[in-house]
Amino acid sequence: MIRLVVCLLLLGSVWPLHATESLVAAARQQVGVTLTYDPAYVTLAYPGGDVPPERGVCTDVVIRALRVSRGLDLQKALHEDMKANFSAYPKNWGLSRPDKNIDHRRVPNLQTYFKRHAKSLPVTQKAADYLPGDLVTSMLPGNLPHIMIVSDKLASDGTPLVIHNIGRGAQEEDCLFRYPLTGHYRLKSDS
C-alpha cells in the first residue's frame, strides 16, 4: 500500500493535475497544517514571503494554494499591479503607497486584483454556478471581508464545500452560502 501511495505521488509530479484540481488539492493540503487564525502584521521576505505555515488568515489559504498549484506569487503579482495602478485599489487603510508585507493578505485588494486579472462571475445562490477552484468572497458579521476556495467535494444537498480559514485554521466545510456573498472569480488558465 505504501508503495502505491509513493507511486501515485510520483506520478502526480510527472502528470500534473488539471489547474482547478491542483488548486483545490493545494488548499486541502493546508487543512491540519494551518491551525491558527492570526491576522498580525508581519514583515515578509519579498518575493515569495509567507507567515509560518501553522498560522494565517483566509487570504493565506488562497496565497499558498496559488503559489503551490500555479506558481503564482500573489504577493509579487498584486504588489506590482498595485504599484502600477494604485488608484484602482481600495483606500481602506489610509496608505499612500503599496505595502508588500500586507496588501496581498487583504480581501478587498484580492477582490480588485481578481476583477482585473481573472474572470469575474455573477454572485448567485445556485450551487451549480460554483465550480471547484473558484474563489468566492463574502462579508462576515462585523463587516469583515472573507475569501474561500470552492472545493470539489459536495455537501449532502449538492452545495460545494469550501476551503478557508474563518478562525479555526484551514478547514474544508459546508458554508458557501452561510454569509452574504460579495464576489465570485474564476482564474484564467494562464493565471
Image: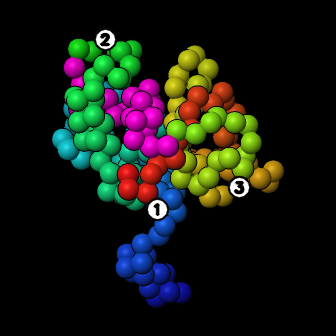
117 in magenta: yes
What residue does disc 1 label? 19
Please rate how many residues cluster around mark 3, counting C-alpha atoms within 10 Å: few if below 14, some from 14 to 19, many from 20: some
Q: Position of residue 8 (x, y in %)?
A: 47, 81
Left or right: residue 162 versus residue 24 is right
What residue does disc 2 label? 94
Helix, strand or loop at label 1? It is: helix
Report the disc number at residue 154: 3
- Specify the amino acid type for callout 3: Leu
Please rate how many residues cluster around mark 2, counting C-alpha atoms within 10 Å: few if below 14, some from 14 to 19, many from 20: few
Residue at (47%, 37%) from the top-left corner? 58
Q: CA distance from mark 2 to mark 3?
A: 40 Å
Along the viewing direction, whichever of 39 and 125 lies nearer the viewer? 125
Q: Position of residue 110 (x, y in %)?
A: 41, 34
Q: Position of residue 178 (x, y in %)?
A: 70, 33
Along the viewing direction, whichever of 98 and 30 lies nearer the viewer? 98
Residue at (61%, 20%) from the top-left corner? 141
Q: CA distance from mark 2 to mark 1?
A: 36 Å
Q: Position of residue 57 (x, y in %)?
A: 44, 36
- Specify the amino acid type for callout 1: Ala
Q: Which residues are magenta?
A: 97-119
User: Residue 174 sits in which quadrant?
Assistant: top right
